[in-house]
Amino acid sequence: MCDIIWCKKVKEDGTVCNTVNYLDPFNFWNWEGTIACAECGTVYYIHMIQGWMYRGPEEQPPGTKPDILPVYADKPLEGYVRYRPGVEGRTRPYLCLPRDIYLGVPDPRRFSIRGYPVRGWPNQPPSTGIAGSAGFKWEIEKLSPEVWQEFLEKKKKGEVRDW
Amino acid sequence: MLIKQGKKGLDKKFERIPLEDQPGPKSQEEMDEMKMPYEEYCRKVFDVGNEFVKPTALKGIRWLSTTMYIFTPHSVTNLAELGAEVIKIEMPRMGDPMRHTSPFNEAYVYPLHDTRPMTGTGVACFNANVNEYYISMDYHREEIKEAFYTLVRMSDGLTQCYRPGTFDRWKQSYRYLQEINPRFISVWGGGFGYGPKIWGGSYDILGQAHAGLASITGFHEDFGGHPTKSTNWNIDWYSGTQITVAILAALLWRRKTGLGTKIEFSQVQASTRCLEYGVPLYGRFGIVRQRWGNWDTQLCVHGIIICGKSDYPNDKNPQLRDEARYVMVSAFNDPDFKELCNVIKRPDLYEKYKTHKQRVEAEAQVEIYHELEKWAADKSRSEVTRILKDAGLLAMPVYNDKEVYESPHFRQRGTVRWQADPWYGDAVVHSTYSAGLMSKTPRRKFWDLRPVGGDNVKIYHELLGIPLSTIKEWYEKTII
Amino acid sequence: MGIDRSFLEKPVSEMTPDEYRLMILEPEKDTDHICWNCRHFKPVIKNSNFPPADIIGWCKKIHWPFYWCIPEHRIVKKCYAYEPIK
């Protein structure tokens, strides 16, 4: 169950805000306070009990400080316009982000963080044995000489560490 | 009194061992060595970093692993790290589905298999199938059946994770295998096991949820909390280790009786073992235990508090910038709690809650932790830790992975170390060497993973003696 | 005594938070427990077949932070922790 606040505020230029602010149930299951619209910043008072809207949303006078921001918002009437989590000042800061970068696609790596080679990029040479049998050593000097060279250069420059 | 077996056998007389044959120091030098400081002694006997020259406890045990994901593979990894020879059997061309399960689809090592050069093995697969030989086999094909049974004849046991009855249908279950190898130990690990939910699958999250563990993890309902799953698959790792315990006991039983065992292991029942007093409490009083978050229901102060300032205020990684703020504090006995109250300049709290019986009350805990966090609101995590440690109290920052990696304690003990995987290159090893030190037969990691079918020739040809031409033919027919 | 649910006739705008919560948590049972009118009571909700059949709900107060299962056939008539719903 996820309640929403569909903001119908008429903006200064005469258009309607029409933003859907999502109230994620984990946060708003039992919750009372003020929350701002991600698009126009209008502050609403809500009081939710057991995931249901008991009071509100009631528009608050301009200048009211919101207690919290929505986790996510979109504008369904305008296609795929949305505010993802963690947009500063619009949606709630997303504290549990695992890293500062997030790719979501394979991230090929040739070296570990301490600078030694890692077999982390696709299209490696095929195995030399029968039925896919593999040896017990990655002969990097033979199989990927360019990475080996790069490693030696890194080593010369002192970019290879023990830890 | 030290005795040794008499010449005529156990049930006859026992005689004394002469003093010079008894263990213990025989000279002044030996005496000095025995009196070396404990720290030095530990360094010497464990000799961290030189595990590979020592013998292994399970040498001579051969185990088959027809497993997937983490739970059942981990039960076998424990054996492989202790020296058993493990043969992991995977689906041809495809491998363990865990290979295709990587965090956020980002981190892979290559190659997976000759036929799929652009596909890698996810790093989430690491640590679960250590030191094993990887062969591929399609059990459905008649041609390969005999090879499977030959492996069973030559092995001590098998761990499998298919749905209950599947291996039975394929004539690969304990009932069939004990006919050809009465010493065979057969392990099934899965979700529910026999019973009304026999068809339920097995997932870590299921183990956490269905056994009631998730319902007592997280913050209390009154504080806005919800039942919470541990982010990692800890019940997979936990129940895998429980299987290993059962396997080791079964091996010992086999030494005594010469007979194998069937081990049936339901993952959802495994985690009831760590529910502590919850279910007995219900049974006696009809009281349902609830979540108590970062605090403790039996001890106070004994929990995790949040500090106001981050140790890395300017780091761009939110994991460090925003979250490196938690400290674990323990001061539950009276003098410690008194000292803690003095440190936070609230001696009145001690006056109010003089006994542990008083402080451990839920209402008291709410007040005490609230005061602690108020005190820590203008301090960073390291400041809080330092102040409390200086006062002689137990306080430790809540580490994240980066800090675990950098911890000198773990580095010195070899818990976290860099080791080159012979096939996939440089890798931090944090799993094998963290599972306890053993002076005589320590765990060790030779390699983490091998490509799918990477040892097909080694096992099918060198161990079973199947001609290379047959192996080639099987490979072309995708039987292996 | 039974369940005093006369507040259900009020419009939502006039309900107190306690009353609103109890309107949502429509209970399965109807007994003579004093608990029905207590604000620390958490009922077994309608059509839920999971909890044991012989309880009417849980008391959130007397064993807080744990919950006590209130047996259906042991009628609680008075209770030191009783607080009427507001």
Image (cartoon, coloured by chain):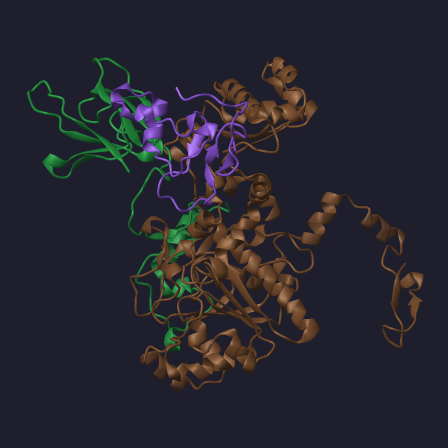
Relative to A17, say whether A1 is above or below. Answer: below
User: Is residue A134 rendered to the left or right of residue B272?
Assistant: left
Please tell me in which quadrant of the rendered image residue B186 appears: bottom right
Residue C17 against residue B207 in the figure, above or below: above
Q: Position of residue B201 (x, y in %)?
A: 40, 59
Q: Which chain is purple?
A: C
Q: Residue at x 46, y 22 (%)?
A: B308
Q: Colour of chain B?
A: brown
| Quadrant occupied by the N terminus of chain A | top left
Q: Is residue A74 above or below residue B108?
A: above
| Image mark count | 0
Residue B466 lies in what quarter of the image?
A: bottom left
| Left or right of residue A85, residue B26 in this image | right
Residue B199 visible (yes or no): yes
* Residue sitting farthest toward the left: A14
Residue B39 coordinates in the image, percent (x, y): 72, 43
Residue B414: x %, y % from top left: 59, 49
What is the x, y in percent for residue C25?
A: 35, 33
Towards the viewer: A26 or C66: C66
* Residue A135, placed above or below residue A91: below
Which residue is depicted at the point 53% across and 54% down? B270
Most distant residue in the front direction: C1
Along the line of sight, the residue nearer the viewer: B419 or A93? A93
Q: Nearer the viewer, residue B470 or B213?
A: B213
Kindly indicate the quadrant of the structure image that contains residue A34.
top left
Which colour is chain A painted?
green
Q: Is residue A107 visible to us here?
A: no
Please state if B97 lies on the left or on the right of B459 as rendered.
left
Looking at the image, which is closer to me, A45 or A141? Answer: A45
